[in-house]
């Protein structure tokens, strides 16, 4: 069956901390974590394409819902530029992991009016919405794109979170189990229904877990859920991991 009919679930990548040597095979260890240092690092040098990514500062903004109640959201502005040598497809996938173990997908449970208010606050005439920025990026600074990632402020007090940004590189690797060296497997999902694919015997179709080069941005956020904008946000680390 063609690869376009398969989609890999993300649960294995969320629940596993990953360890690896710089030159050896990737290995997975059962240890839940949001520490980027526990993930494998990309290759020192390879021929895979990469996009230049320049993040701004995460900022909290209050957005009124349909009932007039204010709800807080984080937004992270960024610029992406293509110096890879050829045009590339840009399909960012962003996950936020908090120090309390909360996993948040950027863009999920975010009202459409949020981008309108963020754009009004940033006053950047070149700013594109998270939806419209997806697509081909041509080469050079004349074709760089400005956009934002937006996600809800979690209800609990968060002092630190890490933003994982995938889709900035073509570098991938198959994860392997440290005890056997065999590929780490997970059920393949139908991309249209999200349901596990079954073989002719009714057994789940298994596929290797693929890790992608990902930018990890870790911030200190000492604010509170009720007033996350009142204290400064500090970038603690920017790393590249395979996740």
Image (cartoon, grey):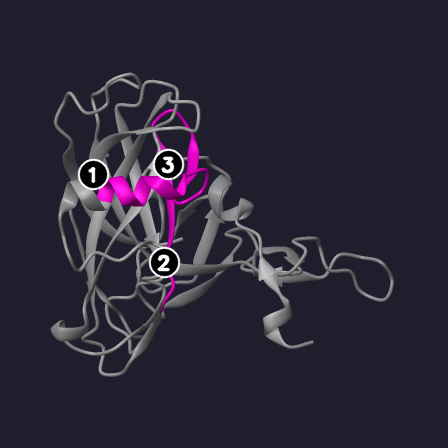
Give how far across and how far down residue 205 sits, in percent.
72, 61
Q: Mark 1 packing: few (<14 Cα in 10 Å), some, or many (20+)?
A: many
Q: Are marks 1 and 3 in contact (CB under 8 Å)?
A: no
In the displayed structure, 58 sits above or below 4; it is above
Give how far across and how far down residue 228 sits, in percent.
23, 23
Q: Does residue 215 appear to the left or right of 208 in the view shown? A: left
Q: Mark 3 packing: few (<14 Cα in 10 Å), some, or many (20+)?
A: many
* Residue shown at 41% from the left, 39% from the top: 111
Q: Earlier in the sequence, mark 1 or mark 3?
A: 1
The residue wearing badge 1 is 58
Disc 1 versus disc 3: distance between alpha carbons?
Answer: 14 Å
Q: Secondary structure at mark 1?
A: loop
In the displayed structure, 121 sits above or below 4; it is above
In the displayed structure, 61 sits above or below 48; it is above
Residue 99 occupies which quadrant of the picture?
top left
Q: Does 98 appear in magenta?
A: yes
The N terminus - image quarter: bottom right
The residue wearing badge 2 is 92
The residue wearing badge 3 is 97
* Residue shown at 37% from the left, 36% from the top: 97
* Residue shown at 30% from the left, 39% from the top: 162
> Looking at this view, is 169 or 181 the one in front?
169
> Looking at this view, is 164 or 224 the one in front?
224
Give how far across and how far down residue 2 sits, in percent.
64, 77
Q: Which residues are magenta?
A: 90-118
């Amino acid at each position: 069956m063609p690869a376009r009919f398969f989609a890999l679930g993300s649960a294995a990548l969320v629940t596993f901390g990953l360890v690896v040597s710089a030159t050896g095979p990737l290995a997975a260890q059962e240890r839940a974590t949001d520490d980027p240092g526990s993930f494998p690092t990309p290759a020192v040098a390879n021929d895979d394409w990469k996009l230049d990514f320049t993040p701004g500062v995460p900022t909290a903004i209050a957005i009124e819902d349909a009932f007039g109640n204010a709800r807080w959201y984080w937004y992270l502005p960024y610029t992406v530029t293509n110096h890879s040598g050829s045009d590339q497809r840009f399909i960012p996938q962003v996950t936020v992991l908090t120090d309390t173990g909360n996993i948040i997908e950027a863009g999920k449970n975010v009202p459409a009016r949020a981008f309108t208010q963020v754009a009004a606050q940033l006053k950047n005439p070149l700013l594109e919405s998270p939806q419209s920025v997806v697509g081909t990026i041509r080469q050079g600074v004349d074709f760089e794109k400005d956009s934002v990632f937006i996600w809800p402020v979690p209800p609990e007090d968060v002092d630190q979170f890490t933003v994982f940004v995938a889709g900035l590189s073509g570098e991938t690797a198959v994860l392997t189990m440290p005890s056997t060296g065999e590929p780490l497997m997970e059920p393949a999902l139908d991309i249209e229904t999200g349901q596990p694919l079954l073989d002719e015997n009714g057994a789940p179709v298994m596929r290797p877990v693929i890790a992608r080069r990902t930018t990890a941005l870790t911030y200190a956020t000492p604010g509170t859920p009720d007033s996350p904008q009142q204290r400064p946000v500090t970038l603690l680390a920017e790393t590249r991991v395979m996740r």
